[in-house]
Image: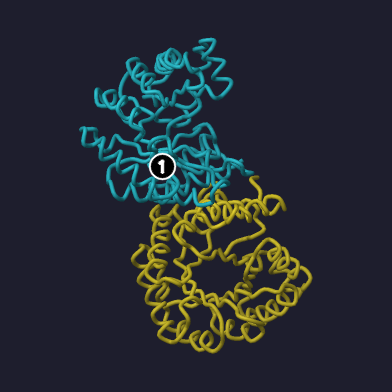
Chain colours: A yellow, B cyan
């Protein structure tokens, strides 16, 4: 299971303040704690900064990679910001994200085919959010085909089925699970990724619902998730699910995480 | 999801004491609290009493059905105890359990075909526990075929794939999940059931692992579980999984359980 640490996002006030003040120490600490908790990629997102987004994102790339020896997930809806940020990145970044929206696809294609990288491909066409399994699978398949036709490697594509709240439509959980299962089945070698927290919007006990949804997504075949790896309860769910699915030889990772205090029940 | 309340089992000391003293009030309370927590069946098991098992089981049936208006799950490896206990039962009992062991099958068959009831069918042949998905599916299919050939209704069979500890063999989780999926797929209308706690034997954070396993089993198609319905964290997992799988219209059951305090995160 590939973990993308989500905490460096200017939609969080402490991060926005640190970016504004160019507080490299604080950002470095947030990167470090996620790396120690088991992140494989560190997400950086300065989307709330609008005109200052590009400068801020480039600064974040430098600061985070000075601190931790991990690739980053460069997170922006703006192809220009992504194409600038990747110039500052060492190694193979994850680009988050491309979609089937025409302008976005065209603008980002040369960036991602110009250098080795992974890409998050959102199941979204022309700004309409998908509802059913079929809509997700159709847009996802379309994106996979278009990217691989351009020579982009299948195994570097991370399809994001886009999670929507079950409080708005109770079919939204099953729609994501079905889409993950179908895409992983139809394109062996491709990856799937999602954020979790949208699923529980508007409901009580959100962190419980999010954890539980992660587990169900993993059973459906999800290969990566954007989450907070310092959340010990969430990580307990992730590692116990891996173990229950037979992916943790001798239950070693689970027991080691328990003994080192990286997971918890409370 | 059908819930069988597991608490009235003489392997628990408080229950053993109450049965020994014929303390109907205490047993009645344990039945009542499970009914209020959402049990559809109340399991009664006096297996530790050996020679006194039959008398004790018959007494339990009377006492519990005096207290709650629910069918019982009559739980014994001994066909004689089951055939006596069912004489005291009002309505349609769940008989737990039959297996492919020859003597057990032959002795129990007339009991379960002699009156309307459900039966738990263990994936076990001649006292050998199953290891792989295939072994479970083979024994389970065999049992389903033998029972339905005798006119026993498919939808009243609850196949139990038999949960074994992942600490002993890390493939044991996936083996149960695969067996549930396969049996539910091959015999539309049949039910599957299991107890959870064996899965986590020998590991830390057992209740977390059990909860998580329940959720994965539900995704695989499990239709019933033998569990403690007064465990508010376990029930939170059960109800949120139902909701995430799209089986809780308007998220009504989950929200109602939250508001009434029947589920909890801690």
Q: Nearer the viewer, residue A131 or A230?
A: A230
Q: Secondary structure at mark 1?
A: loop
Q: Residues within 10 Å of mark 1 (few under 14, many from 20)?
A: many
Residue at 54 percent of width and 87 percent of height? A111
x%, y% of residue A46?
63, 74
Give the residue at mark 1. Answer: B161
Q: Quadrant of the C terminus of chain A?
A: top right
Q: Quadrant of the N terminus of chain A?
A: bottom right
x%, y% of residue B211?
53, 43
Residue at 59 percent of width and 41 percent of height? B206
Left or right of B197 on screen, residue B88: left
x%, y% of residue B73?
39, 26
Q: Quadrant of residue B145?
A: top left
- Above or below, comparing residue A136 to residue A87 in the picture: above
Residue found at the very far right of the displayed protein: A25
Is residue B247 visible in the rendered structure shown here?
no
Left or right of B253 on screen, residue A242: right
Is residue B108 visible in the rendered structure shown here?
yes
**Mark 1, chain letter?**
B
Residue at 50 percent of width and 17 percent of height? B49
Tell me how many marks there are. Answer: 1
Left or right of A38 on screen, residue A241: left
């Amino acid at each position: 299971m590939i973990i993308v640490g989500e905490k460096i996002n200017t939609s969080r006030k402490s991060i926005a303040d640190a970016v504004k003040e160019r507080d490299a120490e604080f950002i470095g600490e947030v990167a470090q704690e996620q790396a120690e908790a088991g992140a494989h990629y560190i997400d950086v997102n300065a989307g709330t900064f609008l005109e200052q987004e590009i400068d801020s994102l480039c600064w974040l790339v430098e600061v985070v990679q000075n601190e931790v020896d991990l690739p980053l997930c460069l997170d922006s809806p703006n192809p220009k910001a992504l194409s600038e940020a990747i110039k500052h990145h060492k190694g193979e970044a994850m680009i988050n994200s491309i979609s089937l929206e025409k302008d976005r696809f065209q603008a980002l294609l040369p960036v991602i085919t110009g250098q080795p990288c992974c890409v998050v491909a959102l199941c979204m066409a022309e700004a309409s959010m998908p509802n059913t399994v079929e809509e997700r699978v159709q847009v996802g398949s379309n994106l996979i085909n278009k990217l691989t036709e351009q020579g982009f490697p299948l195994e570097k594509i991370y399809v994001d089925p886009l999670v929507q709240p079950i409080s708005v439509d109770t079919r939204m959980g099953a729609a994501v699970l079905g889409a993950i299962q179908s895409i992983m089945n139809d394109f062996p070698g491709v990856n799937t990724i999602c954020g979790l927290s949208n699923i529980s919007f508007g409901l009580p006990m959100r962190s419980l619902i999010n954890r539980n949804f992660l587990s169900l997504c993993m059973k459906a075949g999800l290969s990566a998730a954007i989450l907070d790896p310092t959340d010990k309860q969430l990580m307990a769910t992730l590692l116990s699910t891996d173990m229950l699915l037979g992916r943790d030889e001798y239950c070693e990772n689970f027991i080691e995480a328990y003994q080192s205090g990286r997971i918890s029940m409370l």
